[in-house]
Image (cartoon, rainbow, N blue to C red):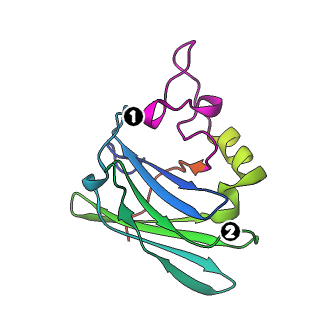
């Protein structure tokens, strides 16, 4: 959560796609345009690479592309503006994919609220009771920080 009314999900695929999904406090999807000035960087070995982030064609997420993340110590930095307030976030990128993702999902899993299980964006199932996109990695760490 960021503040009391913005939930964000950061998705990093093994192919290097970066996605930012947004919803309200009860997980109803927001259009990507609810935030602005989205900036992302991958930090590898002390070098930072900018990731061009744009609103997807469907308008439901911010998306960007980088080289696949393979090395430990790689960090994904993300920033955006919501209601005039800047937010900056950093994630150990390798925790968003593979075995690191499984641990992150387990450590941050929600208990499903219905026997059929809640649905994520566009009706995708939520693995382990957590919102996400089948076949993709995601994180919903604590709160974003304001610089």
Give x and y (percent) for residue 113.
52, 18
State the residue at coordinates (46%, 52%).
143
Q: Which mark is residue 43?
A: none
> Quick one: label 1, few (<14), some, or many (20+) residues within 10 Å?
some
State the residue at coordinates (52%, 68%).
65
> Quick one: label 2, few (<14), some, or many (20+) residues within 10 Å?
many
Asked which secondary structure carries label 2, the reply is loop
Q: As displayed, is residue 58 above or below residue 77?
A: above
Residue 125 included in the magenta stretch of the image = yes
Viewed as shown, does residue 64 lie left or right of 106?
Answer: left
68 or 3: nearer the eye? 68
Q: Quadrant of the C terminus?
A: bottom left
Report the residue that reaches farthest toward the top.
115
52 or 141: nearer the eye? 52
Q: As displayed, is residue 9 above or below residue 114?
A: below
Viewed as shown, does residue 6 lie left or right of 10?
Answer: left
Report the residue that reaches farthest toward the bottom.
47
State the residue at coordinates (78%, 50%).
99
Most common secondary structure along the magenta stretch: loop
Q: Which mark is residue 69?
A: 2
Task: Give the extent of the magenta segment.
Answer: 109-137
Tell how many labels: 2
State the residue at coordinates (48%, 33%).
120
Give x and y (percent) for residue 139.
57, 50
Q: As displayed, is residue 6 above or below residue 10?
A: above
Q: CA gap, disc 2 to disc 1?
A: 28 Å
Asked which secondary structure carries label 1, the reply is loop
Give x and y (percent) for residue 114.
52, 14
53 or 25: nearer the eye? 53
Residue 118 included in the magenta stretch of the image = yes
Residue corresponding to mark 1? 27
């Amino acid at each position: 959560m960021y503040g009391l009314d913005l939930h964000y999900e950061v998705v990093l695929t093994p192919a290097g796609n970066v996605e930012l999904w947004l919803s309200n406090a009860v997980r109803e999807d927001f259009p990507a345009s609810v935030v602005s000035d989205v900036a992302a960087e991958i930090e590898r070995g002390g070098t930072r690479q900018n990731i061009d982030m744009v609103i997807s064609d469907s308008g439901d997420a911010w998306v960007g592309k980088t080289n696949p993340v393979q090395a430990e110590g790689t960090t994904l930095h993300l920033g955006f503006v919501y209601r005039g307030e800047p937010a900056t976030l950093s994630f150990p990128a390798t925790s968003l994919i593979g075995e690191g993702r499984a641990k992150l999902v387990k450590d941050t899993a929600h208990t499903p609220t219905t026997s059929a299980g809640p649905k994520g964006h566009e009706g995708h199932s939520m693995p382990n009771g957590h919102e996400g996109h089948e076949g993709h990695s995601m994180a919903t760490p604590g709160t974003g920080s304001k610089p």
